Image (cartoon, rainbow, N blue to C red):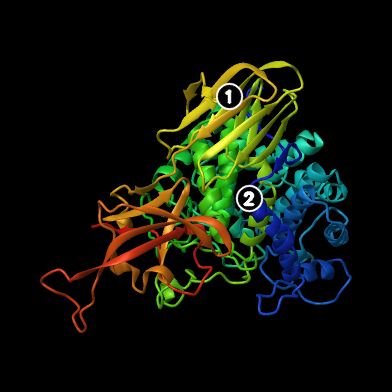
């Protein structure tokens, strides 16, 4: 095996103090809530009409199409989340609902395999005319991924058969010597690769490769398409080649540009394909794009996409905290990208970002109750400004119950239920622990199991127990050491372990016996983090972290006008473990600071405004916004 591969969901059983309750929340609350949303049954929430669109397309109801042109994708992503949820915990009622929706999808599919309710209902004579804006391939990609999830996680093939018919239509239509084209919103590339692995049909892999290879070639497709379109939505400029990642062929791209989610979906497919066909040029392009994102265009929380204009990457180091975009789906996409890069090459920098996304950028997208969701994840909220002034309208201070473009909520549900596929990997005689999610992993090739016991990210002690079928078995056990961590300790059977360290992982190669234990201890002291001085939004500021968790300050704990607070450079930061938002043993950070006092009627002064000592409290960033409305700030002025 040349490349490391992650274990599938059936090989991992999660039993984790942090993640198991979250998975239960998704299964017991989020998925049923979203089912109600898709059926327009939740009072006060934005109308979806997504399932009614399928009913109308299937001829079971009469009516008009409602929603975004890509409304079908909400149903697809919900189905994918359901597949993973059912793999974690059987639920006859939920499975019945999913089966009914799958039957409905099949009835809405046209005889030749075409599947898109917008065009079946509203524009039947304009199919495939506007690939840049209308997202037929994107919607089909998400439904294919749902089909593969049901096949892999549950062994159910009804949706797979439906979507193979759609994939066959796509393969018959697009390609060399056929109709030219590629998607405005990448996704079909990832989906076709998964479908190839599920079915063994090589044409699906070749179609994914075609879409990747064709992107950015001359003449640029979207500019050519715009000349003959029968349908114009006016959502995207066909001349903006950065927005659509078509400024160069994929192997020549140097910078992450344009719509952040579309970009990282594309890069994920590129990385997946690079390992599939062993393509060094594609691998090198992925490395360049990864470095540009993580070293010049990423927020401390792992969020990406700095500007509302095009939901896009901005220029290098331009990372405003209050005008941020930081779509939840973009953080989900970075988890996808990190996973595929880890399969290409096992390096700690990829596992570091995967961890950063899981504990910060993705988690912040969902309310503690599982019924409210952020699209935009700000690092600074100012009452009376955020969500109010025109340029800040997108930066909401509270998570809404739903929104018209509802791509993020089902994406979060799907990622959390499929979390087992982001924890463990194997290659030849080596097993890899990429994250510290508690539970048991079963490795088919080595015939061994490993039990992980952990209360990460709140505590830094992780214990592994090896379970093997033979008395002795030789293999290498590799464990990720986070890049933020200094002074870690590793013990094998309570004694010093013999290992070597490489690219963010420790490797223990030995003859293992049943019951061997590996104990990893990570120091979890609070620490200050500083930004590159080129990030002007963070000049003179510090952020607080403990382990992988970013912290923030809310007005609820610190009073109004957080911009007036100062954190002295040498002030000690203490940890106060308490019950917070109904969750036990949550570490909050406490410290003494200062507040710059206002002087009524005075806008400027020739001398510094007076300061008053005050107690400060910081809470985990992903938990903000769950109490009364108020300001929030990640970066605090130091001095």
Q: Does label 1 or label 2 sit earlier along the sequence?
A: 2
- Along the horizontal axis of the image, is 251 left or right of 318? right
Which residue is drawn at the image coordinates 79% and 57% (left, top)?
Answer: 115
C-alpha gap between disc 1 and disc 2: 27 Å
**Front-most of residues 3 and 311:** 3
Which image quarter is the N terminus in?
Answer: top right
Which image quarter is the C terminus in?
Answer: bottom left
Task: Name the residue carrying label 2.
Answer: 19
- Along the horizontal axis of the image, is 52 left or right of 250? right
- Along the horizontal axis of the image, is 115 left or right of 267? right
Which residue is drawn at the image coordinates 58% and 60% (left, top)?
Answer: 583
Task: Name the residue carrying label 1.
Answer: 493
The image quadrant of residue 467 is top right
**Residue 143 visible from this viewpoint:** no
The image quadrant of residue 472 is top right
Provide the secondary structure element on which disc 1 rests. Answer: loop
The image quadrant of residue 511 is top right
């Amino acid at each position: 095996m040349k490349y490391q591969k992650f274990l599938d969901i059936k090989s991992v059983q999660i039993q984790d103090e942090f993640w198991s309750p979250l998975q239960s929340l998704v299964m017991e609350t989020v998925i049923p809530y979203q089912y109600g949303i898709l059926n327009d049954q939740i009072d006060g929430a934005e109308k979806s009409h997504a399932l009614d669109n399928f009913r109308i397309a299937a001829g079971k109801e009469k009516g008009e199409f409602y929603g975004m042109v890509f409304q079908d994708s909400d149903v697809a992503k919900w189905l994918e989340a359901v597949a993973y949820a059912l793999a974690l915990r059987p639920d006859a009622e939920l499975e019945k609902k999913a089966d009914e929706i799958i039957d409905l999808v099949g009835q809405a599919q046209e005889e030749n395999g075409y599947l898109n309710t917008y065009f079946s209902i509203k524009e039947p004579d304009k199919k495939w005319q506007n690939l840049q804006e209308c997202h037929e391939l994107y919607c089909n990609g998400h439904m294919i991924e749902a089909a593969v999830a049901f096949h892999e996680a549950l062994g159910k093939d009804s949706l797979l058969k439906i979507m193979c018919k759609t994939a066959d239509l796509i393969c018959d239509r697009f390609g060399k010597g056929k109709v030219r084209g590629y998607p405005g919103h990448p996704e079909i590339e990832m989906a076709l690769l998964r479908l190839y692995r599920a079915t063994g049909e090589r044409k699906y892999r070749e179609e994914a490769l075609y879409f990747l290879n064709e992107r950015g070639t001359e003449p640029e497709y979207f500019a050519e398409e715009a000349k003959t379109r029968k349908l114009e939505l006016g959502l995207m400029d066909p001349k903006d080649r950065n927005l659509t990642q078509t400024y160069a062929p994929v192997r020549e791209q140097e910078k992450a540009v344009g719509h952040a989610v579309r970009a990282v979906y594309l890069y994920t497919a590129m990385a997946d394909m690079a390992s599939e066909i062993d393509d060094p040029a594609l691998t090198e392009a992925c490395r360049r794009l990864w470095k540009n994102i993580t070293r010049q265009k990423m927020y401390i929380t792992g969020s990406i996409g700095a500007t509302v204009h095009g939901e896009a990457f901005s220029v290098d180091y331009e990372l405003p905290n209050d005008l941020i975009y930081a779509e939840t789906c973009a953080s989900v996409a970075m988890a996808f990208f990190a996973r595929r890069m880890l399969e290409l090459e096992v390096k700690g920098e990829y596992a570091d970002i995967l961890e950063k996304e899981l504990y910060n950028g993705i988690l912040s997208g969902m309310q503690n109750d599982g019924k409210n969701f952020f699209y935009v994840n700000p690092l600074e909220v100012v009452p009376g400004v955020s969500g109010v002034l025109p340029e800040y309208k997108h930066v909401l201070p509270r998570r809404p119950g739903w929104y018209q473009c509802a791509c993020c909520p089902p994406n979060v549900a799907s990622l959390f239920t499929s979390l087992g596929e982001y924890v463990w990997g194997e290659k030849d005689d080596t097993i890899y622990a990429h994250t510290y999610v508690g539970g048991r992993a079963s490795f088919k090739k080595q015939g061994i199991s490993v039990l992980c016991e952990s209360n990460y990210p709140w505590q830094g002690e992780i214990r592994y127990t090896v379970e093997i079928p033979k008395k002795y078995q030789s293999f290498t056990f590799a464990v990720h050491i986070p890049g933020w961590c200094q002074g870690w300790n590793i013990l094998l059977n309570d004694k010093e372990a013999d290992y070597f360290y490489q690219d963010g992982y420790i490797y223990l190669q030995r003859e293992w016996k049943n019951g061997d234990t590996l104990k990893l201890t990570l120091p979890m002291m609070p620490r200050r983090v500083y930004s590159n001085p080129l990030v002007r939004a963070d000049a003179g500021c510090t952020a607080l972290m403990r382990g992988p968790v970013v912290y923030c300050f809310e007005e609820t704990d610190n009073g109004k006008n957080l911009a007036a607070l100062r954190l002295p450079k040498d002030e000690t930061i203490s940890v106060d473990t308490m019950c917070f938002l109904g969750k036990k043993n949550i570490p909050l950070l406490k410290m003494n600071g200062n507040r710059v006092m206002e002087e009524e009627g005075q806008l400027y002064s020739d001398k510094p405004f007076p300061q008053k000592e005050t107690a400060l409290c910081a809470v985990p960033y992903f938990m903000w916004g769950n109490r009364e409305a108020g300001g929030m700030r990640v970066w605090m002025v130091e001095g």
